[in-house]
Amino acid sequence: MPARALPYRPHNHDACVTQALADARDICQQRSARLTPTRERVLELIWQSHKPLGAYDVLAQLAEDGHNAAPPTVYRALDFLQQNGLVHRIASLNAFIGCAHAGEHHTGMFLICRACGNVLELTAPSVSGAVQAAADAESFELDDITLEIAGLCPRCQKDSGHE
Amino acid sequence: MPARALPYRPHNHDACVTQALADARDICQQRSARLTPTRERVLELIWQSHKPLGAYDVLAQLAEDGHNAAPPTVYRALDFLQQNGLVHRIASLNAFIGCAHAGEHHTGMFLICRACGNVLELTAPSVSGAVQAAADAESFELDDITLEIAGLCPRCQKDSGHE
DNA sequence: ATGCAAATGTTATAATGTTGCAAATTTCCC
DNA sequence: GGGAAATTTGCAACATTATAACATTTGCAT
Ligand SMILES: [Zn+2]
Ligand SMILES: [Zn+2]
Ligand SMILES: [Zn+2]
Ligand SMILES: [Zn+2]
């Protein structure tokens, strides 16, 4: 299971990436989903950035590899990774980020810093519970929650103090 | 103040639209914001649909009016309406819907039926509170909440039962 | 080997959103 | 009212994000 994400703090991110890829291989094996080289490389690229990557960012990185990919290649890989719970799409940014809780059943909640662009994924049962209750109250059958919080991360709050 | 939205139930929607426009005029007057004819017409078009309208849908409707508008016209009107709390953008749909609580300070939560496309805007203090608490726990300074719930509305749950 | 299904390559195009600048309109002050 | 300043609109081009359609290749089971 993935290590707990260290919110915004510097850390050896290569280890995060390595771990995420190892987890992904396990998860795909269990589900007999095929984590092909392109899919794995896209996942790696997304994990290597703490900030969400757009599909065309991924495309550009693939191009640097010498991989002459077209948009559908990237979108298909991203679809696969989403289907298998390995990445999340951030609707308010049109961008993708590695799932910090892959393999665990969860509904992500994303804290998006509008200054530095870093994103922290949380699972907050109290929030999910309140959302579920609100949906129930309207007899609405809940499928999927998009919950994205824009604001300032702790580091950027300090930085804006002495500018 | 706007009438309580009647979730998903049939009703005289023209009255909703009329009320929304009247409210909008009041609100803009108070804020000395200029609700110009184009902006008002865009708001009206958005309110006339229970389903969120895309910017290019609005554009097409304006074209039917004989208004030869270009995309910036629509996006600017939508920006204005958002700034003044008269419409919300639904990030997961790239579309816009009239605010059911214009003038009231609130954070919207949207129940989006994936079958019929109707959207109900709720305000759920318990949800906002839980989100705020979760952000606080990470020392994150919350600016804006995007909360969009996809699922099945009551009507569409029944409909899918006897298909 | 053969055949099928899944995955990828390729080209083109659709859908959504922005920039920059000029012209028109409104506001505000005199 | 006249005129400067600010806001709004018109317009053309462009940028970004995402998908459709169809051919080709690959992996895998019989
Ligand atoms: Zn996740
Ligand atoms: Zn930050
Ligand atoms: Zn609202
Ligand atoms: Zn419905």
Image (spheres, coloured by chain):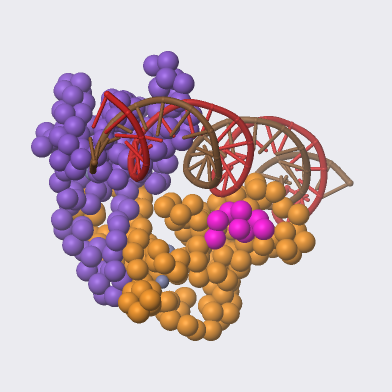
Chain colours: A orange, B purple, C brown, D red
Residue A105 appears in the figure = no
Where B161 sits versus A92, above or below? Answer: above
Residue B127, percent from left and from top: 20, 57
Give, as a single range, the part of the protein colored magenta.
A53-60
Q: In the displayed structure, does residue A39 sit left or right of residue B65? A: right
- The image quadrant where one finds the C terminus of chain A is bottom left
The tally of labels here is 0
Q: In the displayed structure, does residue D9 sit left or right of residue A136? A: right
Q: Toward the viewer: D6 or A11?
A: D6
Looking at the image, which residue is at 61% across and 68% down? A44
Q: Is residue A54 magenta?
A: yes
Ligand 2 positioned in quadrant? bottom left
Looking at the image, which residue is at 19% across and 43% down? B31
Where D7 sits versus B63, above or below? Answer: below
Residue B53, percent from left and from top: 37, 32
Residue A97, percent from left and from top: 50, 63
Looking at the image, which residue is at 46% across and 54% down? A93
Q: Main secondary structure of the magenta part?
A: helix
Q: Is residue A32 magenta?
A: no
Which quarter of the picture shows residue B154?
Answer: top left
Residue B40 appears in the figure = yes
Residue A63, percent from left and from top: 72, 59
Looking at the image, which residue is at 20% across and 21% down? B14
Q: Toward the viewer: A75 or C12?
A: C12
